[in-house]
Structures are given as C-alpha cells and as structure tokens.
Image (cartoon, rainbow, N blue to C red):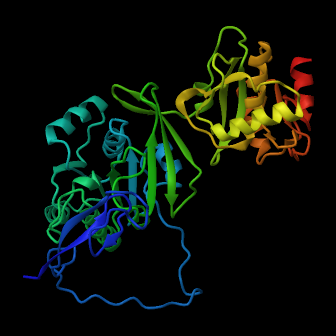
Amino acid sequence: MAKTKTAYFCQNCGAQFAKWVGQCSSCKQWNTVVEEVVQKETKSSWKQTDTSVKRTAKPLRISEISNDKEVRLNTKDGEFNRVLGGGLVPGSLTLLGGEPGIGKSTLLLQMALKLDLKVLYVSGEESQKQIKMRAERIENNTDNCYILTETKTQHIFKQVAAVTPELVIIDSIQTLHTDYIESAAGSISQIRECTAELIKFAKESNTPVLLVGHITKDGNIAGPKILEHMVDTVLQFEGDRNYVYRILRSLKNRFGSTAELGIYEMFGNGLREVTNPSEVLISNAAGELSGTAISATVEGMRPLLIEIQALVSSAVYGTPQRSATGFNVKRLNMLLAVLEKRAGFKLAAKDVFLNITGGISVDDPAIDLAVIAAILSSNADIPIEKGTCFAAEVGLAGEIRPVQRVDQRILEAEKLGFSTIYVSKANKIGLKHTNLELKLVSKIEDVVGELFG
C-alpha cells in the first residue's frame, strides 16, 4: 500500500500548501486552510478492467483536422438548448450551480423525463422514493430514466457499464467520493478527483455528463476554483424566491455564447419555459403611473422589453439613500450625477430607489435612457405616455449614445404593440418600414423636452 501523506488546502480557492498557514497567499482569506489526508494509489481507468493498450495521441497538421460540426443532443427544452448553444455536446461536462431550493434538481429531472435517450440520474442527496414523488408531480414519466442513489464513484461506474446510458446526471458533485482519496466527501481534493474521473469517463465514452454544484454564501460554486476550469460549461440557475421566475445563465461555455439567457416559471408541477419573456416582465397596469419606463434590451441573441420602476422622494435623513435592485448602484450614481451636472436637476437631496421588475438583473448599457426617464418621471410625478419605450446609452457629457442591434429592439417593441421608441440620433437604422415612431435624440435635454414639455 502506498504511503499516506497529508497536505493543506484552502477551502476557498483550492490552493495547496506544505504546512498550515493562517492566511491563504492566493485569495488572501483567513482561516480557510485545512489539513486533508491524501492517499496515493495506482489509478485504474473508469472502466474496472483495462485490457486494451491505448494508442498515444498523434499530432496533426491543422489542415488535416476535420471541421465537421459537432452533433448536439436535443434536450427537448428550448430554453436549455438556447443557453447551451444548441444542445448538449457528446463527451462534454456541464456544471449547474444555484442556491438551495431554487430548482436545480427539478430542472434536470424534468429534462431527463422528457428525453427519448437512456438517462442515468445519480443522486447522493435524495432517496429513490423522494425522486419518484417529484417525478409524479412533473407528470412526465418515462421508462428511459434510471435512478441511482450512490456516492462512491467506483460503484457509479459499475452501474454505468451495466446500463450504458446516453446521458449521466450527477446530483451533486459535492456528495461524491472516491477510494483514491481518503479525505471526506465535499473536500477540495475529493471534488477535484471525482471531477477528473468524470471528465475521463465523458471523453473516453463520448457521453455527456451534467453535474449539480452547491454554491457558497457569496454566490460562488463551492469547492476549488479549478472545478470551473475543468468542466466545459458552467451554468447558473438563479432567481428570487419571492418571484416565480427563474433565470438560467451561462457563465462559461466552450461550445457557444456566454451571453444567452433562459427564463422559466416555477409551478407546483415543475418548471415551464417562458418563450416570450417580454410579456411577463412588463406589468399591465390599469392606468398610467409615474416613475415607470420600458426599455428594449438584448440578452445574447434574444431581444427583451423590461419594465424599470423608480421612486424619488425627499431624504428624511441627512444622507440621501441610493438603492437599486437588478441594476448596478454605481452606474445609478453616475446617471444621477449626469442629470445634476448636465441637465440641471437637483437630486442630491433626494432618495432614489430603482427596481427592474421580474427579479432579473440587466447589465446592458442600453437601459440607461429608460432609467433616466423613470427617475425624471417620478421626480416630476408625471407619467410617461403609454406605448413609449427607450433604447440608448447615456454618456458622461449628457449625450445619447448609440447601441448595438437597434433593429432587433425596434422589431420587438413593434411586435408587442408599442408606438414610440427613443433611440440615439447616431444610430444607423437599417429598417425600411416600421409602424413605430422613431424619436431620434442626441442630448438629455432633447429627451426631457419631448417627454415633459
């Protein structure tokens, strides 16, 4: 038997040390270095017996490499396919992270029950009866989904060899452990080693693997940071528990764009795809309300119309409050400074609260003009005319700057029945025929004059 040795690992970033230290030199966190037992053994392949002699990789000229498109597996979930870039790539490893109770297991089980492929769903957190109860709520029962409750990777690979699935789902990577490492399940070395074994299995068998990952209180995926570098795709499932909507984002994708967005609606019988998110992100208020503006934004390849609400009131305390939900507070302060300096609005002594409805977060600078319109509408207590939306960035000099893909934003607004859209005069608009009235503006003063006279 090989000699047992110990090593010290940072529980925050996964850095390794020869001895204990109080502060990690990599991530500068205190009291995160712990000792773990590392057992060196001769590793076998993920297959229990390795009788064949494997060929070594041969270098090829770049002209000799086939450029055929990768065949993707259709997950039968339009939102999931969009975020992945068209479907699951055979042999890929995808990591899905999210808060406890947000719906990660429901999303993957629902997808496994829809597929016509043979799926092995491995759970280290729930019993088979618990998973059966959830499957009955979803009401998509199929004979192609196999449920396994196991945490040791060696036992999992035995069942994989017996079942020969076309897709493997692991819920979750933090519960797995391998015989090659003697530390506890969920430790840095266990997570790293189990992931390495799953990567080897996925690449050699050309089987896609989906992993569920827990997150820390900071919102990062628990375990070493190298875990996100090892896998091919990192997805984030997020949302406010007070809302029924869930957002699926791509943080890393070797096979597609990281700007795509998927939206789901949570029900008692599972998650429903939201194919037209603009209709659910805009409230249908009976009357016109001040402090509300509609912005045309783009997430990945999908244009969205979102509602922005602002509330401006006199500050009760000495220091005015600045609060934003779903929007960057620093950018809000910048826009307020532009209004103060360039447009002459005295907002320094006012409390300003901003909210993007639906519980989503938006980083698109094209919503700047809608944010300013909502703030000015609330400050003057004058509602913006119904059927008006905005799509422009605001610069520090108070100029209205152009945004990309303005044609798609205009078409989305027209499809949803809007009549007027404010865009930058510098935008090059390629649309020949549109029923929308285009308001071309170049400065904040032009917008204020058009909206409030």
Q: Give the camera-side residue of 400 and 349.
A: 349
Q: Residue at x 72, y 35 (%)?
A: 296
Classify 170 as above or below 336: below
- Residue 199 picture location, percent across and down: 33, 68
Q: Is residue 443 shown left or right of residue 28?
A: right
Quadrant housing the N terminus = bottom left
Classify 73 as above or below 200: above
Q: Is residue 156 shown left or right of residue 67?
A: left
Furthest residue toward top:
287
Quadrant housing the C terminus = top right
Q: Residue at x 55, y 87 (%)?
A: 64
Q: Is residue 68 shown left or right of residue 175?
A: right
- Residue 344 picture location, percent across and down: 88, 28
- Residue 225 picture location, percent across and down: 40, 62
The quadrant where residue 342 appears: top right
Classify 50 as above or below 279: below
